[in-house]
Each structure stands twice: as structure tokens, then as C-alpha cells.
Image (cartoon, rainbow, N blue to C red):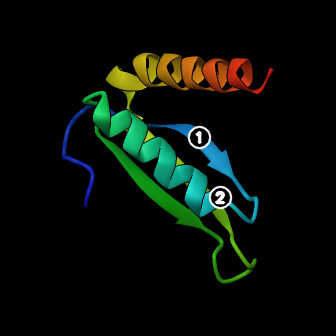
Amino acid sequence: MQPPRTEDSLVTVFSSRSHLANVEAEVIQSLLESAGIECWLARENVIQQPVGNVLVKVLESHADDAKALLRDAVAASEADER
């Protein structure tokens, strides 16, 4: 899916180079989309590295909501581990 043509720029809300980067990004994409926040996955340097850098991007106007949602999800996950 291509990002929409808008004056609102895309902002990275997640970036990872780990071997689980694709899985992490897809889980984050599902979380954001279930909250009504449209997002896009981008991959960088895939040819140069085994995984490359995987990014999750959202429209700048949704970045604060996306970051808050991700913070809450991490906090809930950490609380479950205790």
C-alpha cells in the first residue's frame, strides 16, 4: 500500500534491525491499524544485511497517538511479565 498524497509527512514510530524485525513490525502494524491508525512498513538496506532495517511509519498527525499506543502496549507487556 502506498502512503497517501498529503501535506502530512510520514514519521517513523518503530525501527529495528533485529532478526525478529519483520515480525515485530507486523505486530505493531496490526496494533496500530486495530486502533484506526493507518501505517506503512518500510525496509532499508535489505540487500546489504540479512534483515536490514524495518520501519513502521505513520502520518505525522497520528504520530503522538501511535507512540502513546506503543508505549502503553510495552508497559502492559512488561506488567504481564512480572
Residue picked out by circle 1: 14
Q: Residue at horizontal 38%, vertical 44%?
A: 30
Quadrant in which the N terminus appears:
bottom left
Between disc 2 and disc 1, the foreground one is: 2
First in sequence, mark 2 or 1: give its number: 1
Among the 4 quarters of the image, the one containing residue 72: top right
Where residue 34 appears, x then y in whole percent?
30, 35
What amino acid is found at the position of numbered circle 1 in the picture?
Answer: Phe
Q: Residue at horizontal 66%, vertical 83%?
A: 47
Quadrant in which the C terminus appears:
top right
Where residue 15 appears, x then y in whole percent?
64, 46
Secondary structure state at the residue bearing disc 2: helix
Q: Residue at horizontal 51%, vertical 16%?
A: 68
Residue picked out by circle 2: 21
Secondary structure state at the residue bearing disc 1: strand
Looking at the image, the residue that sits furthest to the bottom is 47
Where residue 24 appears, x then y in whole percent?
59, 51
Q: Nearer the viewer, residue 54 or 71?
A: 71
Q: Nearer the viewer, residue 76 or 9?
A: 76
Q: Is residue 16 left or right of residue 31?
A: right
What amino acid is found at the position of numbered circle 2 in the picture?
Answer: Ala
Q: Residue at horizontal 66%, vertical 18%?
A: 75
